[in-house]
Image (cartoon, rainbow, N blue to C red):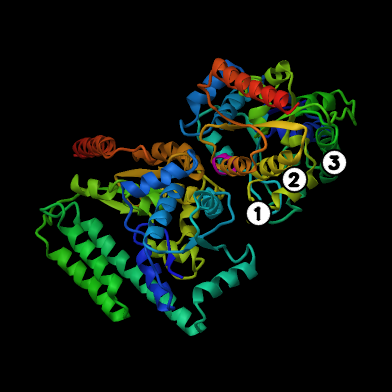
Amino acid sequence: MITVGIPRALFYYYYFPLWKDFFQNLGVKVVLSSPTNKNIVNNGVAMAVDEACLPVKLYYGHVLDLADKVDAIFLPRLVSTAHKEFICPKFMGLPDMIKSSGIKLPELIEVNIDLSRNKRAMRKAALEMGKHITGNTIRILKAWNLAVISQRQFEHIQRSGGQLTPQALELWTEETGNATLGMQQEIPKVALLGHGYNLYDRYVSMDIIHKLQKMGAEVITAENVPDSIIEEEAARLPKRMFWTLGKRQIGAAFHFLKRPDVKGLIHIASFGCGPDSLVGELIERHMRRAKTMPFLFLTIDEHTGQAGIVTRLEAFWDMIEWRNAQCQ
Amino acid sequence: MPVTVPHMGNLAIPLKAMLEYVGLEVVLPPPCTKRTLSLGTQNSPEFACLPLKINLGNYIEARELGADTILMAGGLGPCRFGYYAQIQREILQDLGIDMKMVVLEPPDASIKDFLDDIRILANGQSWLTIIKAIQLAWYKAKAIDMVDIKLEETRPRQNHWSDADKIFDRFLRQVDQLNEKTDIYRAAERAVDEMSALPQDWHYEPIKIAIVGEIYTVLENFVNLGLEKHLGRMGVEAKRSIYLSEWINDHIFKGVLPLKSNKTLRKLASPYLNYFVGGHGWETVGSAVEAARDGADGVIQVAPLTCMPEIVAQAILPEISKDRNIPIMTLYVDEQTGEAGLVTRLEAFVDMIRRRKFIQEVSSK
């Protein structure tokens, strides 16, 4: 049985169930790279160009971690996952960047996923991916359709079930299916905004979710907001946002601003993140105009220290509790 | 309704000619200075790329001169430039600066918006007048490029280092005033002749360095700190990968004119980069390959710090450097970049190339 490696980085946090199921349905063993650790960070930082953002540097590290363990590595070029939208230029050049890095790579399962012009391009991309495993078109499409159902379940657990992505990834793999452990509306919440690969990577985010939970905060993220609300809220911008992740963040931010149970908003961005430099600015300006809740902006990179983050989180949480006490 | 446009190299000259031809009042921002930079930097998001900040400085300074409408280009992503105008509008609003923004989005975004914008800019003129206005702008852009290319050739060869630049600056002032095709081209030819007549060393063979990278930082001398001038003074012939008229052809006429276009560069970028990465990333990779093919001795990539497409290109350029045996250096510029630091790096790069060339020549004999 051949093994396909999937780096535990970037869009792993968005599409892992889809990819895993697809390859497994085709009779392939899927291997994940180790959770981010110091070694992976150091390797990534050493191999990538200095100016790249931390998540991209980590991707190098995760690919290297897989390189001698698997027969093939899944290295998609994620250009666009929605009509007239893009992810980020760095995602679009990622396979070429990895290939120029000098890592000794096994076979690569490369595919361009570009739905910016044509929604049906996904089927074609699936066939292209499957061709590396089998020549049987029907088998590939069948595997794909089943995988899409898993992906929908995974998204459902987050959007309607109120589960954060790391739990959703666990629940989904344990096949407990349609968990509807919805959040209680009354509990005060802190909204975390940021790209999934920063928020949910425990090493990168300094485990910020658990830190907040330990302080007593309930955490809600953009992934917990249904797509229809995101679309509706993001449409309030005079110009359509053309970054998929940026749109989700700004839509969620507008939504959280209206919710009485959300008491504060934290935006986490990688140092040097292009889209976030503008999306974050928009969120901050709208927050400041609304003047309804505290806002914390955290920039993270490979040099970020635990202590600094903890201090800022504690101060932020103290402020929220103080404000709550004032209100009562 | 005095209209203003942000600076990008000498683009303001043809743009101003076009807008004035249809009868609009144009107030250009003063040339970019330290003040433009600090006004822009103070009020922009910290991690935004440099062009956004300078544009904003331009607007504020143009406002001081009486402009109340901004003409700006838009885009469909994924490069940040497509969202510049939106962010700048929010910033101006919070600053309490009341300026109307006309954002020219590509027609495929929304035909109606595009036509509406054109109508504002056309100022009620007939199509014939509009076409003539565009033609006038085109002649000016072509003429500027003609002299610019000659300037690049003359700089390393001239005996006195600022002669050719003086002629070029005078020519720019002249061409700004002219409104007839024949006059414009005659002025350009005269400037070229004057440069040829300068005392210079005709036997000197300068080393050639190609300048590739993000278009704004390549074209705008203020943000690249006079990169080409410095190279010229070191006796290096700098050649840009893109000229104003080529950019206009690619982005405004969608590459219909028979000039070197981005399609050629994209083909050259294969196999190193096979996909559009936003901005000029693809073209940067192609230009580096082109430079190596055309016998350049080195390549310098310039880009604003955190520019996403150029980071992709930067990650790929070492591969080209190795394959084609050509030195490549990357320069990122932002508001912190100092001229002395830049000159030191350029000198080291140029010394290395000279030494390399010398060794190659000796060993081939």
Amino acid on which the number 2 mark rests in the picture? Ile
Closer to the camera: disc 3 or disc 2?
2
Q: Residue shown at 29%/76% (left/top)?
A: B178
Label drawn at residue A240? 1
- Seen from the viewer's position, the closer of residues B257 and A241 is A241
Chain bearing tag 1 is A
Mark with earlier residue (1, 2):
2
- Seen from the viewer's position, the closer of residues A131 and B94 is B94
- Seen from the viewer's position, the closer of residues A113 and B104 is B104
Q: Is residue A237 above or below residue A43?
A: below
**Helix, strand or loop at mark 2:** helix
Instruction: Please tell me whether the stretch drawn in magenta is mainly helix, strand or loop.
Output: helix
Chain bearing tag 3 is A
Q: Is residue B171 left or right of residue A7?
A: left
Amino acid on which the number 1 mark rests in the picture? Arg
Residue range corresponding to the magenta coloring: A276-280
Does A277 lie within the magenta span? Answer: yes
**Helix, strand or loop at mark 3:** helix
